[in-house]
Amino acid sequence: MEGDFIKIREWLLPLSWCYGLGVWIRNQCFETGILKSRSFKVPVISVGNITVGGSGKTPHVEYLIRLLRDQMKVAVLSRGYKRKSRGYLLAGKDVSMRDIGDEPFQMKSKYNDIYVAVDKDRCHGIERLTSDEESKDTDVILLDDAYQHRHVKPGVNILLVDYHRLIIYDKLLPAGRLREHKQEKNRADIVIVTKCPRNLKPMEYRVLTKALDLYPYQKLFFTTLKYSYLQPMYSGDRRPLNDIKPNEHVLLLTGIASPGQMILDLKPYTENITPLTFPDHHMFKKRDIRRLNEMFAQMPEPKIIITTEKDNARLFGLEGLSDEVRQHIYMLPVEIEFMLEQQEEFNEKIIDYVRKNSRNSILVKAKDEDKSENSHRSGNRTRTISFRNN
């Protein structure tokens, strides 16, 4: 059910109140103009969340890449979490995962015809992408995990909400997993409930829609995960998921924020799943490889290792993997799929905004009009000054 992955540490709530006060002050500084947000002439689409990790940002950014790459030059700008380099870096053909981080490396490896850049300062990164000779033909910039980076004013702000960790049930850090108060969802133009079960009933959609309590200017979408063939990391043939036998033992190797969803999705194929989990963006060390080798050697036959694309970026080429592990390790690519036949509507909104190449997008106009029409609404819902107003 929705929200079933949420665990609240009640004893930390006093710290959450202090943290929340600091976040509220920062957001008010942006709302009142004490801190400035910058607009850019190039279309900018932000994809992010207000929950720590695990909402499906990378598959959704990759969906936007596939949607736009045939019509325009796409650039992805990320912070490059846990990378070893500093400052601005545009990924070249021979860039390493350690230079740009696992998620940017994954996207550059899959979509070599796009620009992938990393920079902690997103404003500076946009300036470099649009002015440097090698990337100045950029038509649209996708900001990866930038919902809290308010120094940039995106043309379309997409907020992802994990079905299993709905923000309406969560609490602020450190008691919960929220980076900001749930009312900050009001900044989004588009809200997507991600990782939905495929068998959601019409009543459940209505309950979720009412619970999220969005404004008229915000559009709500629902997506689910769609898995591709198991891809061998080193050797062998790819395998469909339904090729996994009920008696087959799976060692699920993950270094992601929310491995619980993968466990749920693999259970219809086999109940014999042994998780080997590490923190998000974990850089595997020799002791981790030894542990992997030992665990897999002790598992009964038939057996297989399944890992994610993001973990594959950090695992591939590491020394110390046993021959048995190399022969049986597969990565499981994942994409997103829109539910309720919403794909065409989403695509049209994105393409329409980018083609206009203007800050005066249809989404912004609709948002401002609805804000004006609904300014009389009362209740205990917190209203904020539109961050798009100049």
Image: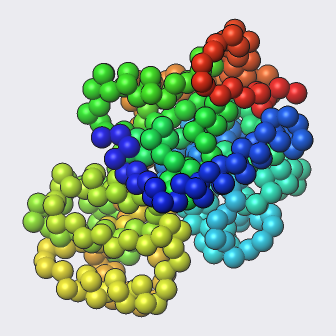
Q: Residue at x 77, y 47 (%)?
A: 26
Q: Residue at x 75, y 42 (%)?
A: 27
Name the quadrant containing residue 364: top right
135 in relation to 379, above or below: below
Q: Residue at x 74, y 18 (%)?
A: 368
Q: How many marks?
A: 0
| Residue 74 coordinates in the image, percent (x, y) | 69, 44
Image colouring: rainbow
| Residue 248 coordinates in the image, percent (x, y) | 14, 67
The answer to whether 258 appears left or right of 142 in the picture is left
The answer to whether 210 appears left or right of 109 in the picture is left
Residue found at the very far left of the displayed protein: 247
The answer to whether 8 appears left or right of 73 in the picture is left
| Residue 294 coordinates in the image, percent (x, y) | 28, 88
Q: Is residue 119 visible?
A: yes
Name the quadrant containing residue 322: bottom left
The answer to whether 144 appears left or right of 333 in the picture is right
For the C terminus, the image quarter is: top right
Q: Residue at x 51, y 73 (%)?
A: 282
